[in-house]
Image (spheres, rainbow, N blue to C red):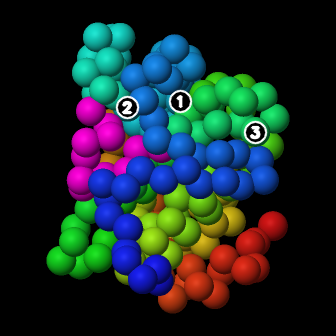
Amino acid sequence: MPATPATFLDKPTLNGELVVLRPVTEDDIPALLPMFHDQEGARLTGSHEEFDESRLHSWYSTRQDQDDRLDLAVVDRATGRVIGEAVLNEWDPANESCSFRICLAPGTYGRGLGTEATRLIVGHGFEALGLHRISLEVYAFNPRARRAYEKAGFRAEGVVRDALLWEGERVDATLMSILAPEWRTHRGHPAS
């Protein structure tokens, strides 16, 4: 733990071998638009929302000022392009916990970019922010994401039955989390 713990107001740049995570800005919207218009991505994340550019500009123009969440752009080192975002949100300071979500643009899957981005932001949550627990939900029809979360050290805790109604089908979600002691053990030994 650092001498002066970071806060959610601190917006770091986190460097990995494949990706860089840096504060997301309004200037990233053009690169992120394919992510918001991707029907498969919407299904995998259970998003029924429609996004227009003016709403996105309002949202991304305020990310730097948020003291209860961390929104970082995922940049592919090989191309220098913004390919998505990784977010720690729903911060519960009394319980030293928060939620995690990540979304990548179509065409960027299968190269380990999401797995590394997950490891970077989760590591920051535990090592710099002093969190004890980071959790997420993943839908049953998204096994690729579940595997990436498992590679980063997340463990299944249970199933939220019929958590999503998607095109007339009810879909379960698996609740997953990682705890600080698990992270300390896992970070040096990533699963393959």
- Provide the residue span drawn in magenta: 62-72
Nearer the viewer's eye, disc 3 or disc 2?
Answer: 3
What residue lies at 47% left-to-right and 83% top-to-bottom?
1
Which tag, 1 or 2, sits closer to the chain's start?
1
Indicate the position of residue 15 as horizontal and vertical percent values.
66, 54
Residue at the extreme front? 3
Direction from residue 126 to residue 48 in the image, left or right: left
Residue 96 lies, with reference to residue 164, above or below; the image says below
What residue lies at 55% left-to-right and 69% top-to-bottom?
123
**How many dots with numbers?**
3
Q: Which mark is residue 41?
A: 1
Do we see residue 46 in this rendering? yes
Pointer 1 and pointer 2: residues touching (CB < 8 Å)? yes
Direction from residue 34 to residue 76 in the image, left or right: right
What residue lies at 37% left-to-right and 77% top-to-bottom?
4
Do we see residue 167 in this rendering? no
Q: Which residue is mark 3?
A: 77
Indicate the secondary structure of the residue bearing disc 1.
helix
**Amino acid type, callout 2:** Ser
- Mark 1–mark 3 Cα distance, whole angstroms, equals 22 Å
Which tag, 3 or 2, sits closer to the chain's start?
2
| Screen quadrant of the C terminus | bottom right
Which tag, 1 or 3, sits closer to the chain's start?
1
Residue 91 lies, with reference to residue 105, above or below; the image says below
Q: Residues within 10 Å of mark 2 (few under 14, many from 20)?
A: few
Q: Which mark is residue 47?
A: 2
Quarter of the image for residue 119 reads bottom right
Name the residue nearer the viewer: 170 or 84: 84
Quarter of the image for residue 60 reads top left
In magenta segment, residue 71: yes
**Amino acid type, callout 1:** Gly
Indicate the secondary structure of the residue bearing disc 3.
loop
